[in-house]
Amino acid sequence: MQRGEDLRRVRNNAGIEFSARARQQASDAAQTAEHARPLTECAPRQPQRRQRIVAVHRQRELVGPEAVGALQDNIANGRRDVLTDKAVQCVFEADDSVVRHPQPDRGGTAGRLATACIADAHAMDSVDCRQVAAAAGAGKRAVGRERLRRGEPEIAADNKSITVKLRTGVKFAPPVNREITSKDVKYAFERSFSANVGGQYATAFFSAIEGAPEKPTKGVKDIPGIETPDDQTLVLKLSRPEAPGVAAALVMPITMPVPEEYAKEFDAKSPSTYNKRVVASGPYMVANDAEGNLTGYKTGKSIKLVRNPNWDKATDFKPAYLDEIDMKTNGADASVDAQQVLKGQGMMLDTNPPAAALKTALTQSEGQFGTVPAGGYRYFPMNTTLKPFDDVNVRKAVLAGFDREAAVKARGGKATGDVATHFLPPGFPGFEEAGGAEGAGVDFLSNPRGDMEVAAKYMKAAGFASGKYEGNEEILMIGATADPVKAQSEVAKAQLEKLGFKVNLRLVPQDAVYTEYCQVPKKEVHVCGGAGWFKDFQDPQSMLEPTFKGKNISLDGGNNNLPQLNDPKIDAAMDKAAALQGGERLKAYGEIDKMIVEQAPAVPFVWDKTTIVWSKDVVGAVNEYYTTGDFAFTSLK
């Protein structure tokens, strides 16, 4: 999925096995060596203590035990705290793909954790829970996740049927207060196809389900291909043999259970108002009043998460040490916030710190950060439908001469990520099959600092005898007014100009880079200076098809195939790979990655890393998929 600098759209991980990198802390000793092990094997901390976390989309602050007393009073008095919207529903279901720092074997004072965030949660319904889910650092209770699902999805031999068994004993939060069944998952699917709900990824990842609408429907319609033979069984019948990809996508937020009897009156409105009354099923939920109105969500200011009284620890792998999370969603300056976090108490920053603050954290703040691969790539796509980038040799010349290290430096240097050589990122399925760190082995990507001789070779092959571009076209590049996109766009402009291009770099607000320019083919943008694509789930299909499959080009807007690459051979290879499983699938998508590189539709320049920082009195954890702090595994010392 595309990711801007001020809005992280995150989605669920479909990996079969999940592991965590843990830093063990003894009660009165410093941290010991890190090691990897499944989260389900992490021993719970003893003794259990009540803690309150206050999450703010940018900094998190822990305060004293008075917070716990208030929370206990609320729970004792039966106060109803309901999961509020799309984003917040994701928050309550923590991912088990976490870099976890296990809790010390000692008690501690209860407290409040405050987090500061870059932007507000613009959507809170379960079909669009990316931003707040990322900020809250929790994961998902979609049917693809371990907590609600019992065992792995069963895929039929013909790849046209998927059966999922659900656990018993998992309940909705107030005001629904009942056990979740397969019918709740079926309704969640169906509502995501409704125009009222706006589940934009339903048709992208679940169109193969029999009877699935090709376009958003008016109201919520029955999908016959989704069957519920009993309360703990969900069966998906497919019209195409694409079960492996569909099964991987089951961790997407649109599969999180939604109670029809409660939500249908809200979903009947256009747009749906369920986002103001979303029901939780994990350890935390957005605070609300007895009528279900959200009191914990202040638009553009804050979100308060409290414990879900119906959550049963016996049904979950998450320790959920914290009692409350207050999220500040109007953070303005990440540099200031980072310094406050590192020097203060009870805080966590939910985003990668700026370069200077990141350097301070890595060199002077031992034990106050966690770094994980971001699971995506940043690139400079070139519009293959516009001259001169309709010529593959011109595009190869650009890649050959481009100083990718300079672009990485503009984003903050090596700490922010490794120089990319192709599109599937490190640690992601298919990465090694695509050539690993070395990539496809093409000469036009062999030198991360650029090679003007190789660039000249391809320019001459394109008909430019001087070895540089000789045309008069003005290249329109769109960048953002704020760093780091502004800085990396300026680097890209300089790289193109040294090859002879005349570049018009137009800087626009970050939220307009995609929606008003790069994703709108009619705007005829030659180069997007702020493009990035990050995993929707752990499957290479989700990393390559939306961005490079010709069939996915949308000329009317919302286009994610930014270079508008339309290669029949690549499309055919993708169609074939979609039905494969296991090693064959990874090998096929590795080869597709190489095919895309050979067409040079974009300059891949960095595989991101994300570093989350926290205060000295915080035992932090980082969600490896969402690349944010994970509140379900974080506590206070």
Image (cartoon, grey):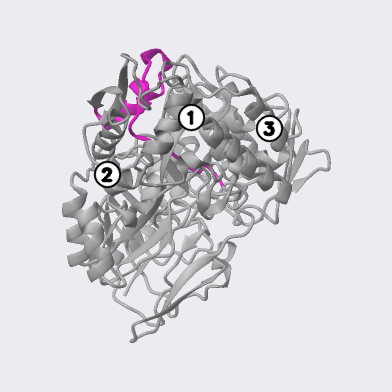
Residue 526 among magenta residues? yes
3 and 2 marks in contact (CB < 8 Å) = no
**What residue type is disc 1 on?**
Pro
Mark 3 or mark 1: name the one nearer the start of the chain. Answer: 3
**What residue type is disc 3 on?**
Ala
SS for tag 3?
helix
Total number of numbered discs in the rendering? 3
Q: Which residues are magenta?
A: 508-537
Q: Is residue 35 above or below residue 576?
A: below
Q: Which residue is identified by label 2?
A: 118
Mark 3 or mark 2: name the one nearer the start of the chain. Answer: 2
SS for tag 2?
loop
Q: Nearer the viewer, mark 2 or mark 1?
A: 1
Q: Position of residue 24 (x, y in %)?
A: 43, 78
**One can see residue 355 in this view:** yes
Pick the quarter of the image with the C terminus: bottom left
Q: Position of residue 488 (x, y in %)?
A: 28, 39
Please give the label number shown on residue 601. 1
Q: Residue at x 53, y 45 (%)?
A: 424
Q: Which residue is identified by label 3?
A: 573
Residue at the far front in the pictured view = 465
